[in-house]
Amino acid sequence: MSRTLTYREALREGLDEEIARDPNVVIMGEEVAQYNGAYKVTQGLWEKWGDKRIVDTPISEAGFIGMGIGASMLGVRPVMELMFWSFHSVAFDQLVNNAACVRYMSGGLINCPIVMRGPANGGTNVGATHSHIPEGLFAAFPGLKVVAPATPADAKGLIKAAIRDNDPVYVMENTRLYGMTGEVPDPADGDFVIPLGVADLKREGKDVSIIGHGRSIIHALEAAETLKEKHGIEADVLDLRSIRPLDVEAILKTVKKTNRVVLVDESKGFGGVSAMVSHLIQDNAFDYLDAPIKRVTTMDAPAIYSQHVEDEQLPNPRRIVEKVLSLR
Amino acid sequence: MSSATADTPRLDFAGSPINKALTAEQKIELFRKMQRIRRFEQEALKYYNAGKIGGFLHLYIGQESVAVGTLSLCGENDHNITAYRCHGHAIMSGMEMNPLMAELFGKATGCSKGKGGSMHFFAPDKGFWGGHGIVGGQTPLGLGLAYGLKYLGKEGAALCYLGDGAVNQGAFHESLNIAALFELPVVYVIENNGYSMGTSQKRSSSYRGCLAQRAEGYDMEWDVVDGSDIYEVRAKTHIALERARKQHKPAILEINTYRYYGHSVADANAKKYRTPEEIENYKTNFDPIRLWRKRLVEEGVATEEQLDAIDKEAKAEAAASVKFAEASPAPTIESVMDDVYWETDNNTPASKLGQHFFTD
Ligand SMILES: Cc1ncc(C[n+]2csc(CCOP(=O)(O)OP(=O)(O)O)c2C)c(N)n1
């Protein structure tokens, strides 16, 4: 059995279940409690769980994120909301020096079971500083785990796995997905957890592999529909879901099946998740490729504000279709 | 501010030298500037709600006296910088409504060519170094403006605005330390509207008497200002600015003010974290424009009719800026790649070296 939930509700249900399951889970961040969250992911949780479990913090990312990391070393399991992932910059030291390195530097003596979550995306016309898409950036720091759910079910399953994980897990959500609905398994049918590191084939095809994560998957599915109807092309759409650990096996499997690859990634052209995936494919499946690997990324400039242009700067279904057609 | 009432006794700063020096025209000009800011934003609000303006829209309505009072003391040697709630500072710095409204509409004729939006107005030629989106991130930049002035041996001072929520960012504390240590001509203006989003100052800040008092820990001057009285804003800011200009000493001013609307227009909780009475009390008893208007009439500087006429002009100017914005072209998709690197825009020999852009 399953029900239809929004992405936002699915995340909330996952958080709620984990708070109930483990008394050490604490939610923390700007406006998460009394205000119910800037994007309403935590709506109702403060009313239900109170001040001890749902904590409003001042606007001081370095301070409260560092505090969460410190508390996690002692066994608290904080889930920190970044109002936007774009504000990571203010707490970068804590995010990449402390959370990522302390386990290694201590020779495994100290763990950081912390979750950092919040929206990471462009496409909301809020300009350069509010539109960063940093999953590739954080995945580049060993010690950190990074996931990017594309559907409500994945959002719930992954947030629950993230909270139970004993390493820092950075969950990249997407403002443009919060209102999206989808089927989510009923809690009555058992604990629904999606392990980190397992990709998901969201659509089966044979002619081309479209690989991505997060909102790119929604675009890829739409593009795949167009490709089928207008061009008779059947696309495999592989959702990475987890950026690190990365399901390399699933990537190679689809590539070996279709022999053509388009990677979709909301990062900029330089670096990003797709650059790494591209490298892995050419390194491990070069002989299977019938065409060069192509990417659809965000045009390589800071995010433009203009509501007339920003969606064109980002990957979108039209750009994916064009790129797939260019492979022939 | 919200616990005060209309009868709370106040000092009169009309007699302070900087205010005594004001001509009738200059006093009327202060009114005109505040009214233009308000009318511009009311028009923007209308078109945001109509879906013509994207992203965020953080309105300054209620706080106009802060930008107008403080910046009315600034000359061509002075500089200012603020956060995302930047429309008031932009207009007060001398930016025209047309390019501002066009920017909100995301048009190529906007002050940032449609690239910045509401949070990112800039006019460096007018000493206005912009609206900035990261809370507290502008505070070291304001420090840098002051450092630049001193380094270059220039006159003037830097005004750096921040909110009551921003005072808790580490960057601000680091800035205060350097400002005092290096003796830099910067005046930090905390625009205390009581709230950072839905969190009241009392729930976000640990402090003794007021936020500005934190300056004491850095051996820095500070003062608290009633933002509803433009005379007081000017009198106290003038002292801080003169000290900065002449002695290169920084200061913090905490100006108590209020925002009438939500944190941004998209603030779904706008009516939840403050009581209607609190908002009403401010609007009726402390509205800086209404109080200034009353004052001008009482002083015999202007008649109600004159002030109405000024307001009408402001309204017409704002409406015209919408026409301009609507008629303006949107940026082209190609323009996304402009303004990233100076040398590629200017097609210099250096722009032929290496590869600058990496798409797909
Ligand atoms: C580093 C960072 N964290 C969070 C935000 C989101 N945010 C934008 S404005 C704001 C409230 C700031 O309040 P305050 O400093 O009091 O200024 P006001 O909005 O009242 O003018 C928050 C939390 C941000 N832009 N940057």
Image (spheres, coloured by chain):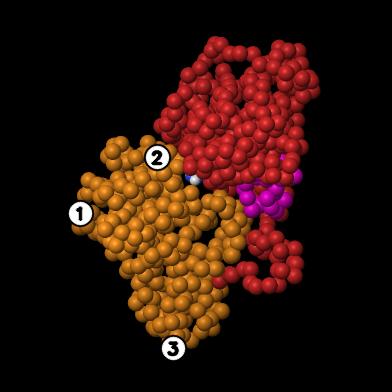
Chain colours: A orange, B red
Are the residues under badges 3 and 1 in a single subunit? yes
**Which numbered marker is on residue A57?**
2
Q: Residues within 10 Å of mark 1 (few under 14, many from 20)?
A: few
Q: CA distance from mark 3 to mark 2?
A: 53 Å
Q: Secondary structure at mark 3?
A: helix
The quadrant of the rendering that contains the N terminus of chain A is bottom left
Above or below for B148 versus B8: below
Residue A305 percent across, percent down from the top left: 60, 53
Above or below for B288 versus A258: above
Q: Nearer the viewer, residue B90 or B48?
A: B90
Residue B118 within the segment the image draws in magenta: yes
Q: Secondary structure at mark 1?
A: helix
Q: Earlier in the sequence, mark 3 or mark 2?
A: 2
Q: CA distance from mark 1 to mark 2?
A: 34 Å
Q: Nearer the viewer, mark 3 or mark 1?
A: 3
Residue B142 percent across, percent down from the top left: 62, 41
Mark 1, residue position? A188
Instruction: Give me the chain letter of mark 3.
Output: A
- What residue range appears in magenta? B108-131
Left or right: where A46 falls relative to B38? left
Which residue type carries mark 3?
Asp
Residue at 60% in and 31% down = B251
Residue at 44% in and 46% down = A61
Left or right: where A293 falls relative to A200? right
Instruction: Give me the chain letter of mark 1.
Output: A
Q: Which residue ends up furthest to the bottom in the rendered image?
A: A287
Residue at 63% in and 38% down = B184
